[in-house]
């Protein structure tokens, strides 16, 4: 199992709207991709900023490629991300899941 981890931030006053947008875009795309095993959206609010971690679980790197395209290390962004995100990072991290309880 592979964990795909993406980080992003938005203004705190847009945090709830961004969660809804994530569910309509990225989370929906995960669900529609064969090999996705689930996902978590984590949020931490500090001051005027909302930081997000999206951790998705996949059965293989091939499954991630079905979602992300030929370069699985590139972040996938959706049309309105520029309206929400304070910055966009081009890449993200993958981890092999070695213990699961």
Image (cartoon, rainbow, N blue to C red):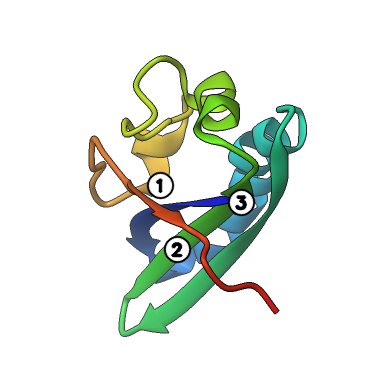
Question: Which of the labelled discs sits on residue 47, or is there none?
Answer: none
Point 36% across, 57% down: residue = 7
Secondary structure found at label 2: strand
The quadrant in which residue 24 appears is top right
For the residues carrying marks 2 and 3, which lies nearer the camera in this image?
3
Nearer-N-terminus badge (2/1): 2
Secondary structure found at label 3: strand
Q: Which residue is mark 2?
A: 53
C-alpha separation, residue under disc 2 versus residue under disc 1? 15 Å
Q: Which residue is mark 1?
A: 84
Q: For the residue carrying disc 1, how many other residues have a C-alpha within 10 Å: few (<14), some (14-19), or many (20+)?
A: some
Q: For the residue carrying disc 3, how many other residues have a C-alpha within 10 Å: few (<14), some (14-19), or many (20+)?
A: many
Residue 61 image position (x, y, % from top left): 50, 33
Number of marks drawn: 3
The residue nearer to you, when weighing 3 against 97, is 97
Point 32% across, 76% down: residue = 48
Point 57% across, 37% down: residue = 60
Disc 3 + disc 1, Cβ < 8 Å: no
Residue 63 image position (x, y, % from top left): 60, 29
C-alpha separation, residue under disc 2 versus residue under disc 3? 13 Å
In the rendered image, the quadrant that contains the C terminus is bottom right
Residue 50 image position (x, y, % from top left): 40, 70
C-alpha separation, residue under disc 3 versus residue under disc 1? 24 Å
Residue 85 image position (x, y, % from top left): 34, 48
């Amino acid at each position: 199992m592979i964990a795909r981890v993406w980080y992003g931030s938005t203004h705190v006053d847009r945090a709830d709207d961004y969660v809804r947008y994530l569910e309509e875009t990225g989370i929906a795309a995960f669900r529609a991709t064969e090999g996705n095993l689930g996902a978590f959206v984590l949020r931490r609010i500090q001051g005027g900023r909302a930081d997000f971690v999206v951790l998705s679980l996949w059965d293989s790197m091939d499954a991630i490629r079905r979602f992300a395209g030929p370069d699985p290390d590139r972040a996938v962004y959706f049309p309105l991300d520029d309206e929400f995100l304070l910055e966009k990072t081009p890449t993200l991290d993958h981890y092999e899941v070695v213990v699961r309880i």
